Image: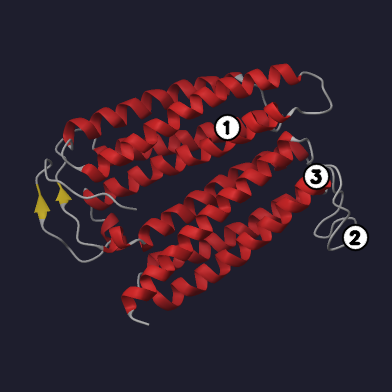
Amino acid sequence: MSEKSQNLGLYRFAAATCWTTVLLLMVGAMVTSNQAGDSVPDWPLAYHRLIPPLVGGVRYEYSHRVVAGIVAIMTLILAIWISVADRRRQVRRLGWNAFALVIAQAVLGGLRVLDRDPAVLATAHAILAQIFFILLVSLALYLSPWWRGDLPRLEDSGSPRATAIAGWTTLIILAQLVLGAGYRHGAFGIVPHIIGAVVVGVFVVWVGRVIRKRFRSVPALRKQVSYLHSAYGTQVLLGIAAYWGVVQLGASLHPSEVYVGLTVAHVLVGALTLATSLLLTLSCYRMIPSAKSAAFGSASVPQHPAGASGKAGA
């Protein structure tokens, strides 16, 4: 197998691991939305068995464990494959960091099952899931043909730099997901989450205006902005609908399909909003590089003015 074919295969496997993690996030959200977090009282077994009776909430909790196991195996394969096929030390390190995170995530999930401060541990479990997901997204981008290719280097004379604004936006979205996880798992109320949504909106609009003003002729960055704005707009609408679903649920012991669908979709699109912001941030660092970001890229390429074009792909 040629090096190019091996690199393409590695990238595709990393992308498949990302999408399997999206499935894991969905199944995990279904556990919470269906109030099935306490349906299995033991860990790592389930009712002292490898395969428990798949009834009631056990179906959701056990499915979550199975998909988590698949993701852990895929992450281990990915880390080993990167170590063998990729020469970049930082990328190899990220591969093993991803595997360490998925193991830590499993341990947190187990502690949650054993009822050691459920609200705090469930919130931490949800937050770590998002961090693990964006680490995998980062790896997939670093391994992509687009990242490895020769791209124009753009000049950014504005202040603050577009890379900084994009980075702040990503961090604020991550903080907002922390607030959302805290509300969803009962650690605190809805008000901080609502305030966070407004702050995120300000930064999403700001980074979009900066990219479109300074790099209007760069399709790669403009496309990433479009993805971010679409994801954030969808997330706001889902957030309103999901809160309506929470109000309608009230004290009911049986969540409706509408409530489950809305809340799960809200969690998933939140993760995708974070991922799109991260991809924009990393794309900025790749095309508007600093000395620190050069280590993840390929060989140096010619520098172009801010108006130069660049084809998208990630």
> Callout 3: 10 Å neighbours few (<14), some, many (20+)?
few
Could you tell me if the residues under marks 3 and 2 are in contact, i.e. CB atoms within 8 Å?
no
Q: Which residue is mark 2?
A: 48
Q: Earlier in the sequence, mark 1 or mark 2?
A: 2
Residue 57, by quadrant, is top right
Q: Are marks 1 and 2 in contact (CB under 8 Å)?
A: no
Please identify, in this view, whether the residue under mark 1 or under mark 2 is nearer the observer.
Answer: 1
Q: Residue at x 28, y 49 (%)?
A: 285
SS label for mark 3: loop
**Residue shown at 24%/35% (left/top)?**
211
Front of the two marks 3 and 2: 2
Q: Which residue is mark 1?
A: 266
Q: Give the x, y percent position of residue 114.
A: 83, 49
Q: Is residue 86 visible?
A: no
Residue pushed farthest bottom?
Answer: 1
In the foreground, 310 or 204 = 310
- State the residue at coordinates (80%, 44%): 116
Distance between the alpha carbons at the discs numbered 1 and 2: 34 Å
Disc with the residue nearer the chain's start (3 vs 2): 2
Which secondary structure lies at badge 2?
loop
Q: Nearer the viewer, residue 221 or 299?
A: 221
Could you tell me which residue is drawn at 79 percent across and 40 percent down? 36
Q: Quadrant of residue 106?
A: bottom right
Which numbered circle lies on residue 116?
3
Q: What's the image's color scheme?
A: secondary structure
